[in-house]
Structure formats: structure tokens, C-alpha cells
Amino acid sequence: MSKGTIQVICGEGKGKTTAALGMGISALLKGQTVIMIQFLKGCQELASCEILERLEPELKIFRFEKSDAFFETLSEEQQKEERMNIRNGMNFARKVLSTGECDLVILDEVLGLLDQGIIEMDEMTTLLQSRVEEIDLILTGKVFPKELDPLVDGIREIDHLKVDNTKQ
């Protein structure tokens, strides 16, 4: 078996999730299985969720959060409840990474959990180290903490060089 890699897609620009999904579809074309676990996604268009469901069972997408609003806009009580849901998502991610249940795991916006103070750096480090060596892993989020640099194989940064606001 070949050794898997840990890749990061980060930056202020839009397209991190799309880039990760592109890598996931590339894995599907090679006959691999993919699990995506999404965090902090807030409201999503129903049409985009329906399209992604068509890729099942080879690509499975999980969201443990119950609210359709962005985490930072929730009340303190709602945030507390969502933290428990996110914790369930992290436990599921740990299980998938440690059992070798699939070929590629995408942890979408997982780096945002560090930004929001929902998880600590040591928990993220432990999660990455729990990965079965053959699994490929993709992490996305706006900010990549340099403390994780020794654990990852590649970092892609997405930025907006020019934004065309007329095509919205």
C-alpha cells in the first residue's frame, strides 16, 4: 500500500471546498472512496446539496451541525449546542481516519474550528496523527496555523487577485 498524504487548502479566497471536491472527484475516477465531513458551513443552497448526493455512495458527505446559520451568528446557547454537534463530527472524523474506512477524507472548514476556539491545537494534532498512514487527507479553512506545518505534505493557498462583482 502507498503512503497517503495530508494536503491543506486555505486562504481568504472562495473555492476551497470546490477545490477539495475536485480532488475528491479525481479520487472517485481512480475507483477510490471518499468521505467529506463539513464543519461551520452555515446556510447552503439546497441545489448544491442535491448534486453532491448524486455522487453517493462513492462520495459520502456528513454534516453534524444542525443550524443553518453561521456559527458566529448564533446565540451563546445555540453555540453551546453546536459545539456538541461539532464534537460528534470530530469523533466521527477520528474514527474514519483511524479505521481506514475510505481512501480519501476531506475535513471541510476544519481549520475554522481552531479559529473559533472550538477545538485546541493539541486535539487537531492528535486527530492528524491518528490517521491510518494509507489514507489521503485534505483539510480546508481560511487560516493555516504554522504549528501544523510539520504534519502536512502540501499547502495550497487560495486568494482573490481580482474580484468581478458584476457577475453575482
Image: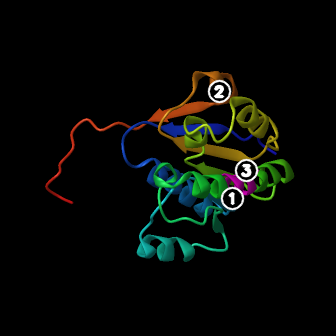
The answer to whether residue 92 is magenta is no
Percent from the top left, x then y, of residue 128?
74, 37
Q: Quadrant of the N terminus?
A: top right
At x 84% / y 48%, what residue is drawn? 98
**Alpha carbon separation for disc pair 2 and 3:** 17 Å
Percent from the top left, x then y, of residue 82?
63, 57
Which kind of residue does numbered mark 1 sit on? Asn
Characterize the local packing of mark 3: few (<14), some (14-19) or many (20 or more) Cα atoms within 10 angstroms: many
**Quarter holding residue 47:** bottom left
At x 66% / y 60%, what residue is drawn? 34
Name the residue tied to disc 3: 90
Q: Secondary structure at mark 3?
A: helix
**Alpha carbon separation for disc pair 3 and 1:** 9 Å
Name the residue tied to disc 1: 85
**Quarter holding residue 45:** bottom left
Name the residue tied to disc 2: 148
Which kind of residue does numbered mark 3 sit on? Met
Nearest to N terminus: mark 2 or mark 3:
3
Please report the bounds of the magenta region as a residue range. 83-90
Characterize the local packing of mark 1: few (<14), some (14-19) or many (20 or more) Cα atoms within 10 angstroms: some
Could you tell whether 58 is left or right of 161 in the image? right
Please, which residue is most extreme toward the left here?
166
